[in-house]
Image (cartoon, rainbow, N blue to C red):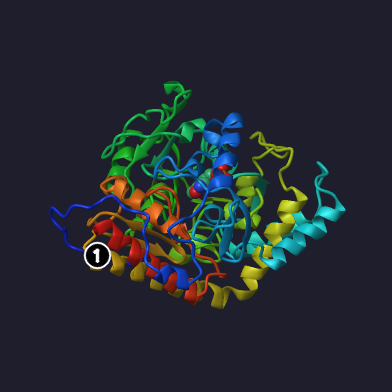
Amino acid sequence: MGCCSHALFRVSPIGNTRYSVLSCYFNSNLFQYGLVAVSRKLNLSNSLQQRAETFFPGGVNSPVRAFRAVGGEPPIIVSGAGARMTDADGNRYIDYVLSWGPLILGHCAPEVVEAVIEATHKGTSFGASTPTEADLAEEVVKAFPSIEKLRFVSSGTEATMSAIRLARAATSRKYIVKFEGCYHGHSDALLVKAGSGVATFGIPGSAGVPEEFVKFTLALPYNNVAALEEAFAKFKNQIACVIIEPVVGNMGCVPPKPGYLESVRSLTQREGSLLIFDEVMTGFRVSYGGAQELYGIKPDLTTLGKVIGGGLPVGAYGGPAEMMNEISPLGPVYQAGTLSGNPLAMAAGLAMLRTLGAGRRTIYPALDARAAKLVSGVTRAAHEAGIEMTANQVGSMFTWFFTHREVVDWDTAASCNTELFGRFHRGMLDAGIWLPASQFEAAFLSTAHTAEDIDTTIAAASEVFAAMRA
Ligand code: PMP
């Protein structure tokens, strides 16, 4: 078991307190930290965004970057170094998004940058195998004892989609179970938003996904063993696999309740169904060996992404050799990729994992402790301002929820005041703090964040909360 802390901070409801619209006024405290405040100019960002809008839907290549859930204008980023990013207008931000998880060593970690430069000089892609693929695989296999063989792909979406194909082939069953609020990429069968409580037929969560494509996807409430029991009873011998984020990041950070993952493991085993841990976010993040190491659970298949690519596009899925040998060219399950195992991405991932592996005994406990200080400091500041907030943290993954309820699943996450989160987000951005642009996304910490960064962030949050209450 690695390091773990589930911090939960609560405050009683503050009744009919009314929040005023957040003004963009911040007092001089923030200036002393060299942060941006009051008149953050976004002239260049705005014109770059306008230009981007002529080319891309919403001006972006992934929707959450458009800031629609929080309002405000998305700054266009031109560089990053350590814990900070700089936008086109020269505004600097302490970054708690870190490319949505991969950059656990911060921006431009020297080991990673050097490895990529060196690899680039040798050639960017060959469409043939290179030695680095096995080097990176060896690191992954050492860290994840449940994985004997794996396949590299280029995104988390490909990893989960392929793992499900393999699970269906290995079991000769059609149904899959996923959990509400868990995100496993944008493949058709996994883009399902369904009713809670009981096993229901999936309803497509996106236009363009025919009902027929998701009719074998059952969406159940997370952290609810009874719902899973019910699904297995109703679809006896038909469920190929259960795919789960062992610590959810995609409804905000939501840890498994004590014993939940153990129950999911024993139920899937009893029913002959495969358990897929989607560790795209948690792998090498909540602990070097991911959530499976942290909680001591061995899944059948694991999907990885984010950190294993060191900030370049890498995904992976893996498990027992016998099962993985079902994949083409050895077996009948087809899966391929022109840029899979790309040498630059492999070099970045290898440098990242070797650095993390060498320092794992100190890196993960330090990240955990620093994140706990940040999470509790900001939560305390909210409470002092009379703002309802609870927080979840597992290692260096965390979320501040604008609700008084403990957040354990999608229904409780959905009770958050997203308008308030939007004000918080805009206020923090003006104060030079970059947070995920949605209440329902986890924030991250890197080894580049200093104790001073944490103090600065807590001070900024206090100012923002005070303005929200004014
Ligand atoms: N699984 C999980 C748990 C994720 O968090 C994500 C992305 N946030 C994905 C899969 C999909 O990965 P990608 O965006 O690389 O396709």
Which quadrant would residue 253 be assigned to in this image?
Answer: bottom left
Residue 406 appears in the picture as rendered: no
From where the camera sits, is residue 214 visible?
A: yes
Q: Nearer the viewer, residue 176 or 52?
A: 52
In-image side of 183 versus 20 (left or right)? right
- Quarter occupied by the C terminus: bottom left
* Residue 44 position within the rendered picture, expressed as x and y whole percent measured from the top left: 59, 46
Q: Residue at x 25, y 47 (%)?
A: 415
Q: Nearer the viewer, residue 362 or 60?
A: 60
Q: Nearer the viewer, residue 101 or 328?
A: 101
The residue where tag 1 is placed is: 385
Q: Please state the horizontal and vertical placement of residue 7, each as a whole percent of the image.
A: 33, 67
Farthest residue in the right direction?
122
Task: Give me the residue at 56% from left, 33% from top.
Answer: 53
Q: Residue at x 57, y 52 (%)?
A: 304
Type of amino acid at the residue the image marks with label 1: Ala
The reply, left or right, for residue 385 in relation to residue 354 is: left
Classify mark 1: helix, strand or loop: loop
Q: Residue at x 18, y 52 (%)?
A: 18
The vertical placement of 95 against 218, above or below, is: below
- Quarter assignment of residue 210: top left
Residue placed most toward the observer, 126 or 467: 467
Residue 428 x, y percent position in the rendering: 41, 58
Up/down of 367 relative to 409, above or below = below
